[in-house]
Amino acid sequence: MVGLGARSGYEIKQAVELSIRFFWTISPAQVYPSLAKLERAGLLTGRDEPQGNRPRRVYERTEAGSEALREWLRRTKPMPFELRDIAMVRLFFADALEPADARELLAKVKARSEERVARLEAIRPAGDAAAVEGNVHPLLTLELGIAFHQAMADVCKRFERASTRSRPV
């Protein structure tokens, strides 16, 4: 995030809220300890830059930090896919519900994905702006997120239609 222009802990939290939090869980409480750890490791440099009466520390990535990032990105280790979605777990067990309750749960999951598509579409201008500045991969991940949630909504719709005809998908 520092390399993308977010320089203070607060700015990093904001950038996370509009980007990676849609596919990677990060606690806002992790940001400041992580920045301190990266600074101690020489991967970031920080300087105090108070705003009014509030303390503020801004960070820049060091050359060692840039190289560490590039090394991490180039790693050839497997990249396991981790999906933790309580809604999908609930759908998996929805046969324990009455049919009307199962349909309601399905409708909620579909609505959640439709809402997520709308929210991601709303931040597309920021992705487009980042791409114009040369950061094209945030836009790629935004597109992947939109496609993922649109696919979930579409499958839910198909299942709703099929289940009203009493046939599973």
Image (cartoon, rainbow, N blue to C red):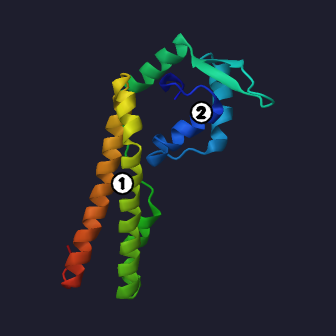
Q: Which one is earlier in the sequence, the residue at label 2 or at label 1?
A: 2
Residue at horizontal 37 percent and vertical 86 percent from the top: 100
Residue at horizontal 25 percent and vertical 63 percent from the top: 154
Question: How far from the left and from the top, in percent, is residue 92?
Answer: 37, 71
Q: Quadrant of the C terminus?
A: bottom left
Are the residues tagged 2 and 1 within 8 Å (C-beta)?
no
Residue at horizontal 36 percent and vertical 73 percent from the top: 106
- Tag 2, which secondary structure? helix
In space, the residues marked 2 and 1 are separated at their CA atoms by 24 Å
For this orientation, the residue located farthest to the top is: 63
Q: What residue does disc 1 label?
A: 117
Question: How far from the left and from the top, in percent, is residue 62?
Answer: 56, 13
Total marks shown come to 2
The amino acid at mark 1 is Val
- Tag 1, which secondary structure? helix
Up/down of 102 relative to 111, above or below: below
Can the viewer see residue 10?
A: yes
Which class describes the residues within 10 Å of circle 2: few (<14), some (14-19), or many (20+)? some
Numbered mark located on residue 11 in the image: 2
Up/down of 66 relative to 101, above or below: above
Can the viewer see residue 77?
A: no
Question: How far from the left and from the top, in percent, is residue 98?
Answer: 39, 88
